Amino acid sequence: MRMWLLTVCALGATVAIGMACGGKEAPASTRPAVTLSGEAAAKWDTLCVTCHGKSGHGDGPGAAALNPKPRSFGDGAWQTSVTDEHLKKVIVGGGAAVKLSNLMPPNADLEGKPEVVDQLVAKIRSLGP
Ligand code: HEC
């Protein structure tokens, strides 16, 4: 039993089990974690989190200077109010593409890369309540 738990901890299989192993922050969401790969992982880790924060609470280091600030992706009412199409449009075209602030930058390099955009959408959805 103990070996089993250690192995799972070592793999860092889920945030919940990570917490059981101690030291990790409370999970932002009860939804299953989404693991990004390739370009989506690179974008999220180096760009999106700087404003949106690792948990998507809109509290990345770059967010302090922003007005308006990014909303929390943990807001359930917002999650249900927006379609995946809207999220894709924001990600590729930036805030201006959907009449939001242009402080949300466009990612023109993701145009024609639906597999990358889909992963980012899944990530945002996974941060909902
Ligand atoms: C320079 C800071 C910055 C970066 C980098 C950034 N965002 Fe944003 N983002 C914002 C701001 C500010 C808003 C809020 C715009 C508003 O409410 O008018 C926003 C809003 C959003 C929204 C919500 C749109 C809505 O309907 O409220 C999504 C989704 C989003 N960003 C996804 C991403 C993703 C994915 C990335 C990485 C590819 C990213 N953002 C990178 C600043 C940023």
Image: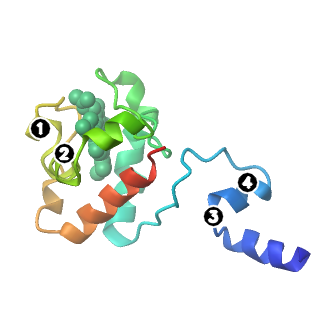
Which sits earlier in the primary sequence, circle 1 or circle 3?
3
Tell me the residue at 19%/68% (across/down): 114
Question: Mark 4 belongs to which amino acid?
Answer: Met
The CA span between labels 2 and 4 is 33 Å
Which sits earlier in the primary sequence, circle 3 or circle 4?
3
Residue 74 place in picture, x, y as percent: 45, 39
The residue identified by callout 1 is: 98
The CA span between labels 3 and 4 is 9 Å
The residue identified by callout 4 is: 19
Secondary structure of the residue carrying tag 2 is helix
Q: Nearer the viewer, residue 32 or 54?
A: 32
Q: Quadrant of ligand 1?
A: top left
Secondary structure of the residue carrying tag 3 is loop
Quarter the N terminus occupies: bottom right
Which sits earlier in the primary sequence, circle 2 or circle 4?
4
Which sits earlier in the primary sequence, circle 2 or circle 3?
3
Q: Quadrant of residue 36?
A: bottom left
The residue identified by callout 2 is: 90
Crowding at label 3, few (<14), some or many (≥20) Cα neighbours within 10 Å? some
The CA span between labels 4 and 1 is 38 Å
Q: Is mark 2 within 8 Å of ligand 1?
A: yes
Q: Viewed as shown, does residue 96 lie left or right of 65?
A: left
Question: Mark 2 belongs to which amino acid?
Answer: Val
The CA span between labels 1 and 2 is 6 Å
Q: Is mark 4 within 8 Å of ligand 1?
A: no
The CA span between labels 1 and 3 is 34 Å
Location of residue 100 with respect to 23 vertically, above or below: above
